[in-house]
Image: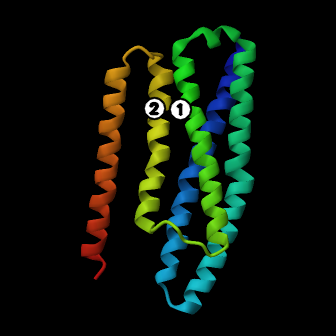
Amino acid sequence: MSAYLYVLAIHIIFVVSWMAGLFYSVRLFIYHTEANERPENERVILQKEYEKIEHKLWNIITTPAMVLTLIAGITLVCINPDLLKMPWLHVKLAFVAGLIGYHFICQRIMKQLKRGIFTLSSFKLRLWNEVATIFLVAIVFTVVLKSAVDWVYGLMGLIVFSMVIMFAVKWYKGYRKRHSS
């Protein structure tokens, strides 16, 4: 059992690192996009710097943390294969699959920004940043409560939580507009 706990601790550490990398990467994407509003000389300097920071964060922290999270998670299942019989783990794995998809979409956004392709506004990127929060909340509640039974309440709660986050982002956008002049 002690090996399981050590691997679990490692899993949690790399989940935290992965999430931090995802949160900060998208925040950098927002700043990278907003640099377009700056004068040419500032824009060029800022965007080059954001590209460098994004690249280092992604390749040194975010992606390695994702890989190590997945390796530790698989190791936990290998140590305790009975976990696969637990319905809550199936729910968690579905959310993790969504988070992995989110990770690769972020990678695509980063590559587009590097090529000077800005398909998302800073507001849309702020909303996108909250998707990781929704996955995090869903995964943590699933793991802690270990309940895949209360689907209706869980889904309703996740929808309400998502709406609150989206409202907060929209409110903050208005707040920034009112206080930027």
Residue indicated by mark 2: 138
The image shows residue 111 at horizontal and vertical percentages of 67, 64
* Residue drawn at 68 percent across, 41 percent down: 66
Query: Residue flagged by tag 2: what amino acid is it?
Result: Ala
Measured Cα–Cα span from mark 1 to mark 2: 7 Å
Which quarter of the rendered picture does the C terminus lie within?
bottom left
Left or right of 45 on screen, residue 71: right
Residue indicated by mark 1: 95
Query: Residue flagged by tag 1: what amino acid is it?
Result: Phe
The image shows residue 78 at horizontal and vertical percentages of 75, 16
Are the two marked residues, 1 and 2, in contact with CB atoms closer than 8 angstroms? yes
* Residue drawn at 44 percent across, 26 percent down: 141
* Residue drawn at 62 percent across, 44 percent down: 18
* Residue drawn at 34 percent across, 48 percent down: 165
Give the SS element for disc 2: helix
Give the SS element for disc 1: helix
